[in-house]
Image: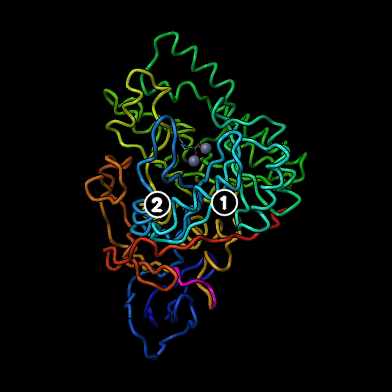
Amino acid sequence: MKTLIKNGRVVTAVDDYYGDILVDGQFITLIGKSLDLAADKVIDAKDKLVIPGGIDAHTHLDMPFAGTTSADDFRTGTLAAAHGGTTTIIDFAIQAKGQSIVEALDVWHAKASSKAAIDYGFHMIVTDLAETQVGEMKRLINDDGVTSFKLFMAYPGVLLVDDATIFRAMSIAGDMGGLICMHAENGVVINEIVQRALAEGKTAPKYHALTRPTKAEAEGVNRSIALAEMAGSPVYIVHLSCYDALKKVKEARDEGIAAFAETCPQYLFLDYSYYEEAGFEGAKYVMTPPLREKWNQDQLWTGLKMNDLQVISTDHCPFCFKDQKELGKTDFSKIPNGGPGVENRMSLVYNGGVAQGRINVNRFVELTSTSAAKIFGLFPRKGTIAVGSDADIVVFDPKKKITLSAKTHHMNVDYNCYEGMEVQGVTETVLSRGKVVVENGKYVGKAGDGQFLKRSTVQLR
Ligand code: URP
Ligand code: ZN
Ligand code: ZN
């Protein structure tokens, strides 16, 4: 099957030109001007951007958490991602305490295979790293294509691991070209503040934010970087939310330390005031770290511009307002943490970034696709438009506007964090490894189109 994409403005992290792209089977095979070639399908991309498929390096599909399970599974979550112009996700598999890491990976393979609409990889959340599991971690890096791991400084008693475990994991990753992704918040101190608040009868959703100070995040980031430096390994801070934490990353990078970080649309476009919405509405925004004071947003944009932040992912972890968020109706600490966003990321970042003049279109591509491909061992197969790369291509209308809403989104969740927000920049057509899966905004693929991606190791130091 050959597909010719004609007349588009082809934009990668470094290119910006008008041209035609020939896709043969799963790959990009030719790029040129006015290609006059026979093809089974021709897509006219006049007045459109033709960009690499988005890579969302942080999703939680079908994830058990806080007595419930995230509302999107691999079928609905990846279908929603495709609608929004994301053609690769890296989801988090979880090792339960004491469980074999290999066994945990098998569980996540079973959740995803035959359901995914787009390609996917896994990071492994490590909660236990005894001697046998050290061997398994090495096996994941060497043989299984799982080259990144998430460790938690938060959620004591559930996901939190101690500094010794973090140091051990970082030492292995540093030796082998793996990467440790850190949930950097001082969860032990936060827990103390949460218990005090509850004892004082402070149970409303806003106390989720008020009990998680930015200093607790900054301390976690600082400690993560120090541990990584001691272990001789790079570190990647996930879902960085505030200036206090960003300063620690910037300071390290200025010293030449291999510290990397992502932020997420919710920290760029939403803020603490959402917790003050009437009744229990604030529960929709209960995520960790929480939404911060609005002034942090400008600082995060500066971080994105200056490459102190390299990636925008979503931390898509949806729980329905009804029945799921409501688990914490009388106690904010029981509200499942997380929010939806996988479908809206590309439009939100284009609108807030490019259309509103904060970043240029190359940086948009870099932040939503290329950097993640490079950091997580997928480049140049993913993250760019080049001969030989997978034909993961998005035809994106930079002028069209849509209003984000739960009424029209495809995520399996009963609210949208950006309800009623008008955004400029809309995904029109999506190719996933050469197959059109979204055409003029309609899903035309099928569950199981997506394949597991074995990722490479990367030397980030
Ligand atoms: O609130 C969040 N972020 N939920 C998902 C789990 C995590 O820490 O990433
Ligand atoms: Zn986290
Ligand atoms: Zn997360």
**Viewer-nearest residue: 16 or 194:** 194
Q: Pinpoint residue 250: horizontal percent, then vertical percent.
A: 64, 42
Main SS of residues in magenta: loop
- Residue appearing at x 45%, y 46% in the figure: 314
Q: Amino acid at mark 2?
A: Phe
Q: Is residue 69 above or below residue 176?
A: above
Label 1 sits on residue: 310
> Tag 2, which secondary structure?
helix
Quadrant for residue 438, please give it. bottom left
Q: Pinpoint residue 209: horizontal percent, then vertical percent.
A: 44, 25
| In the displayed structure image, the side of residue 223 where residue 269 appears, left or right | left
- Residue appearing at x 67%, y 47% in the figure: 137
Q: Dot 2, how many residues are within 10 Å of its Cα: few (below 14), some (14-19), or many (20+)?
A: many
- Residue appearing at x 55%, y 45% in the figure: 104
Inspect this view and state whether residue 303 appears: no
Q: Is residue 96 above or below residue 73?
A: above
Inspect this view and state whether residue 232 appears: yes
Q: Amino acid at mark 1?
A: Gln
**Viewer-nearest residue: 12 or 21:** 21
Tell me, yes or no, whether the two marked residues, 1 and 2, touch with CB atoms within 8 Å.
no
Label 2 sits on residue: 74
> Tag 1, which secondary structure?
loop
Of the two numbered discs 1 and 2 on the same chain, state the one appearing first in sequence: 2
**Viewer-nearest residue: 459 or 110:** 110
**Viewer-nearest residue: 361 or 211:** 211
Q: Which region of the structure is painted magenta?
A: 388-392
Image quarter hosting the N terminus: bottom left
- Residue appearing at x 57%, y 46% in the figure: 103
Quadrant for residue 190, please give it. top right
Q: Is residue 173 above or below residue 395?
A: above
Q: Dot 1, how many residues are within 10 Å of its Cα: few (below 14), some (14-19), or many (20+)?
A: many
